[in-house]
Amino acid sequence: MVLNGFFLLLFWAVSLCPSTLNAQAPLATDQYAPLSVREKGKVFGQRIISPASLAKSAFTAGIDQWRDSPPEWGQGMAGYFRRYGSKNGTRSAENGIGFLTAAALHQDPRYFRSGETGVWRRTKYALERTVVTRRDSGRQTIAIWNISAHYGAQFVSNTWRPDRVTSVPDTLARGSISMGYDAASNLLKEFWPDIRQRLFRR
């Protein structure tokens, strides 16, 4: 399980690097400009259909295929495409819930790099951004859009998962794992520009 998680994070680093090279996250210290509802819709829509997201689904579906999880979906191409479809369906539900919640509560779905110095301070900031976000006013608030998206999508995915894994504890556990991956993604967004600069001298 730990090994699978390591390879997943490694894949995220590889898949997200190209997009980060072209457009890194804005700084929290920059002058804040809120997104319109339309702009928020574009943010969430891109997260559904971006090549990196589709590739990530293909990779994680491959891990589940290797682990035969869940076994009810079988092996072969049919089993793989069930798992791949489940990944894409869950991500679509996650971003749909995220968009509706962010728009209704006037919350900003973007990640803003801290603009601070010190590894531990920046790490703490990145992890906090999993549950803290900005309102359209610029003030900090609980990231209800993110929390509801990760957990809500797992409950939606229960409609096509085997009954054996659709209990409330199982669903909440999957939501927590999804939140953990989001925290890892925040760390990458926070530190990748520095790593890129060291690696590529840019």
Image: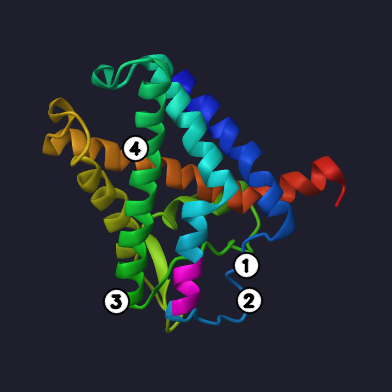
The crowding category of the residue bearing disc 1, from other C-alpha atoms within 10 Å (few below 14, some 14 to 19, many at least 20), is some
Spatial CA distance of label 4 from label 2 is 38 Å
In this rendered view, identify the residue nearer to me: 20 or 69.
Answer: 69
Going by the numbered disc 4, the residue's amino acid type is Ser
Q: Is residue 41 magenta?
A: yes
Rendered-image quadrant of the N terminus = top left
Going by the numbered disc 1, the residue's amino acid type is Pro
Where is mark 2, residue-wise? 30
Which secondary structure lies at badge 3? helix
Which secondary structure lies at badge 1? loop
The residue mark sitting in front, 3 or 1, is: 3
The residue mark sitting in front, 2 or 1, is: 1
First reached walking from the N terminus: tag 3 or tag 1: 1
Going by the numbered disc 2, the residue's amino acid type is Asp
The residue mark sitting in front, 4 or 1, is: 4
Q: Position of 18 compared to 70: left or right?
A: right
First reached walking from the N terminus: tag 4 or tag 2: 2
Where is mark 4, residue-wise? 86
- Looking at the image, is 37 positioned above or below residue 174? below
The residue mark sitting in front, 2 or 3, is: 3
Is disc 2 in contact with disc 1, using a CB cutoff of under 8 Å? yes
Q: Which residues are magenta?
A: 38-42
In this view, which residue lies farthest toward the right? 201
In this rendered view, identify the residue nearer to me: 200 or 93.
Answer: 93
Identify which residue is drawn at 28% across, 49% down: 153
Residue 114 lies, in percent from the top left, at 58, 62
Is disc 2 in contact with disc 3, using a CB cutoff of under 8 Å? no
Where is mark 1, residue-wise? 26
First reached walking from the N terminus: tag 4 or tag 1: 1
